[in-house]
């Protein structure tokens, strides 16, 4: 947000600072504002436990990590995982004050069991897992990564630059039916047939290489009525769909949750931030399935009966937080019973206000690629 960085109090709160590189002075933290920060800080530690070991499966630029480490000085190990080497480099600098605790680790959070085994962390030893499933501002702002259609760059969209599949390979090489399926299933876009046909017709004329080129094709083939009804750019849902396919995002969410459960300590928690309805639906169902498994010993309980969402102040400061949802699952202590119906979601009242704001206010986003619904843009809004 253009105004937030000029306020010294907010700059201090976010830990914004600079470091020098061969290209000059570069801001480390003000390219990223961690979403749902207050909710994460209040939810990550159970009231009857202490944080000793935390695993951040999506370390990003280290925004959430920095604040968690400040608030919980008893943390002994903070294992931060990310498959983007540039993000790990920036996070290492952001978290240099905690270098004795933080362990930046290259890798995919889907392989957390292997990573923890190498780190010497056994079953029942992790007090909190944090997964922020969105694309970070740092990645959105990097045109070379190809996540945002308002900046011309190659059609890449890989979070892991070593993987072979790119968005360009899909757009220029996959059959029309497969492109349509991706737009329909992962973008939930009713125009999927029309857009898939337009893309395939355009690629017969010339190879589609850049983000702006693809966005223009989609926009030119979107009905005027659709543009009037929607407050997001016509290319938003297609870019979301491509990113999900390139990075196998939904498969990652589906498979990782059961892998985390054995490593949770008693009263340990799993926090997952999602940014569009497909991901949130998977997280919700997986958490409920874990809670309903009464054969588990000890039992698991969903702490957030409804997802925690951004309030109006946060949305004004960081418009990309509007579609973020946080859900929390906790492993109970042996013999501890479920407290269903007894706990109130501290932030539940914000959900209605946020929805009311969405329906009554014009889109304040300075970035037209930022979504105003739970179906996010080329990148799910800000992640860390």
Image: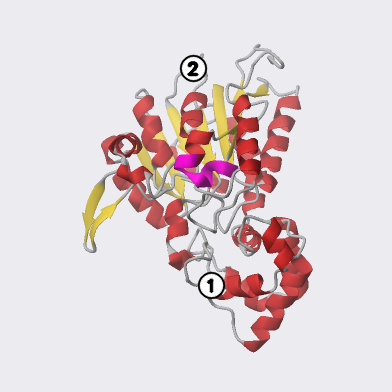
Q: N-terminal of the two: label 1 or label 2?
A: 2
Q: Residue at x 44, y 24 (%)?
A: 51
Q: Residue at x 69, y 47 (%)?
A: 278
Q: Is residue 297 above or below residue 102?
A: above
Total residue callouts = 2
Report the magenta stretch's main SS: helix
Label 2, on which residue? 49
Q: Residue at x 58, y 25 (%)?
A: 347
SS state under label 1: helix
Residue 245 lies left or right of residue 314; in this view the side is right
191 versus 259 height, above or below? below
Query: Label 1 belongs to which residue?
Result: 212
Q: Which stretch did the figure color magenta?
A: 316-323
318 falls in the magenta region: yes
For mark 1, does the 10 Å Cα neighbourhood hold few (<14), some (14 to 19), or many (20 or more) residues? Answer: many
Residue sitting nearer the eye, 124 or 144: 144
């Amino acid at each position: 947000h253009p105004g937030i960085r000029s306020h010294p109090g907010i700059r201090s709160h976010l830990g914004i600072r600079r470091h020098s590189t061969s290209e000059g002075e570069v801001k480390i933290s003000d390219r990223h504002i961690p979403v749902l920060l207050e909710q994460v800080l209040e939810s990550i530690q159970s009231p009857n436990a202490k944080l000793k070991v935390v695993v951040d499966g999506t370390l990003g630029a280290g925004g959430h990590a920095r604040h968690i480490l400040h608030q919980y000085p008893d943390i002994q190990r903070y294992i931060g995982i990310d498959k983007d080497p540039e993000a790990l480099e920036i996070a290492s600098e952001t978290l240099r004050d905690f270098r004795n605790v933080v362990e930046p680790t290259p890798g995919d959070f889907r392989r957390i069991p292997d990573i923890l085994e190498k780190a010497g962390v056994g079953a029942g030893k992790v007090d909190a897992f944090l997964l922020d499933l969105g694309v970070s501002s740092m990645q959105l702002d990097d045109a070379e990564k190809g996540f945002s259609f308002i900046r011309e760059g190659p059609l890449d969209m890989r979070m892991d630059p070593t993987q072979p599949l790119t968005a360009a390979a899909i757009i220029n090489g996959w059959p029309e039916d497969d492109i349509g399926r991706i737009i329909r299933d992962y973008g939930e876009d009713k125009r999927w047939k029309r857009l898939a046909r337009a893309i395939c017709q355009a690629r017969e004329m010339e190879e589609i290489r850049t983000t702006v080129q693809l966005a223009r094709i989609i926009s030119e083939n979107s009905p005027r009525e659709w543009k009037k009804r929607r407050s997001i750019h016509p290319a938003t849902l297609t870019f979301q769909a491509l990113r999900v396919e390139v990075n196998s995002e939904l498969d990652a969410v589906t498979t990782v949750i059961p892998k985390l459960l054995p490593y949770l300590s008693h009263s340990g928690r799993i926090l997952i931030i999602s940014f569009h309805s497909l991901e949130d639906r998977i997280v919700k169902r997986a958490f409920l399935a874990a809670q309903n498994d009464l054969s588990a010993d000890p039992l698991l309980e969903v702490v957030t009966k409804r997802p925690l969402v951004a309030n109006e102040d946060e949305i004004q400061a960081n418009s990309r937080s509007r579609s973020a949802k946080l859900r929390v699952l906790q492993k109970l202590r042996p013999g501890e019973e479920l407290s269903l119906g007894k706990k109130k979601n501290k932030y539940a009242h914000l959900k209605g206000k946020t929805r009311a704001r969405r329906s009554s206010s014009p889109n304040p986003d300075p970035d037209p690629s930022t979504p105003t619904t739970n179906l996010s843009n080329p990148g799910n809004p800000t992640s860390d």
